[in-house]
Image (cartoon, rainbow, N blue to C red):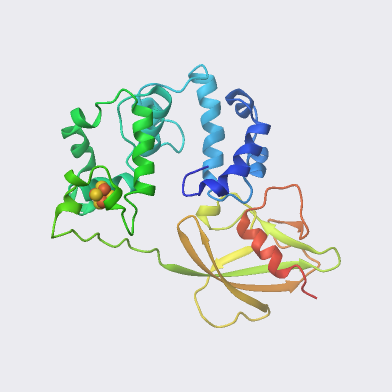
Amino acid sequence: MLQQTQVKTVLPYFRNFLLHFPSLESLSKSNERKVLKLWEGLGYYRRARNLLATSKIIVKEHFSKLPKKIIDIKKLPGIGDYTANALLAFIHNQPTIAIDGNVKRVFSRIVNKSENKIDFNKLIDTNKKSLFRTKRHSDFVEALMEFGALVCKPKQPECFICNIKTTCGYFKSDKKFKQVKKIQPKEKNYNVFCYIHKKTNKIALTKKHDLGFLNKFYLPLIEEATTKNKIKNWNFHSNFKNSISNKKLNINLYYKFSLKLPLQSEWFSLKGNNEFIPSFTKKIFKQILNIN
Ligand code: SF4
């Protein structure tokens, strides 16, 4: 849940999730519909699907215990280098470092070099004797993350209270390196078409669309906009911006009243229902709820 999401946002979801699934076994017996419903509003839904799939694999193939080898952990759905190393340290207290944005920034400042000029795995391997002096590997990984978030912060690092400033290249150097700016994702234009059944206050949603990052989720009809002209035979409602995962969307929202359900769609009440509906679709619900 914490991938790309702040702790304060996650907490209520996490607590509620544990109430429903107090153990790995209980999660492994559940289904996607239930898990997604509990995840509703948190975004990055692939995490929920992967978590469910992973719980089933661990229970069935690993006797409900996380494997101890990184190669086996990385075979679990959605687990890459970062998560695998974090798990190895947190669960098995193994000497390893989970390299995230915070850790990269800290190391690059210590050696006073731009991140893209550092081979982080090599750097860790070369310095493993001094890095892994502690036996508390789990605490060390967490401390590094916190240090990056609270002391060696992205914009104004707290160098004067930092306890490693005497050995930090960035602090000591008159020639401080300049960080390469990250390339921001380009905004894409989409047209969203809402068929509305006025009498019952329902909207047509479909899972058949080309938005890979919302694959298998209910959306109104949506297509990439190829022209800036307004679309004929549709009522233009509004324009709004939305971010999903790391994608930036510029949405033109259209609607029309209809008694007929478009192909491969289903009617959904605009006032709420038991199906899992992604936040993006809910945002559209809010916008068109009071159309007359
Ligand atoms: S001295 Fe400053 S730049 Fe160096 S590690 Fe500490 S906080 Fe970061």
In the picture, which quadrant includes the C terminus? bottom right
Q: Residue furthest right?
A: 199
Q: Front-most of 163 and 230? A: 163
Residue 135 lies, with reference to residue 38, above or below; the image says: above
The residue at the point 18 percent across, 45 percent down is 166
Q: How many marks?
A: 0
| Residue 80 shown left or right of residue 241 in the figure | left
Let me know if residue 14 appears in the view: yes
Q: Quadrant of residue 156?
A: bottom left
Residue 118 lies, with reference to residue 265, above or below; the image says: above
Residue 116 percent location from the top left of the image:
22, 53
Residue 251 percent location from the top left of the image:
56, 70
The residue at the point 58 percent across, 43 percent down is 11
Residue 185 lies, with reference to residue 15, above or below; the image says: below
Q: Residue furthest front?
A: 161
Let me know if residue 112 appears in the view: no
Q: Residue furthest left?
A: 174
Q: Front-most of 276 and 215? A: 276
Residue 205 percent location from the top left of the image:
69, 58
Q: Quadrant of residue 238?
A: bottom right
| Residue 114 shown left or right of residue 268 in the figure | left
Q: Front-most of 252 and 179? A: 179
The residue at the point 63 percent across, 43 percent down is 12
Q: Quadrant of residue 56?
A: top right
The residue at the point 64 percent across, 48 percent down is 40
Q: Front-most of 83 and 112? A: 112
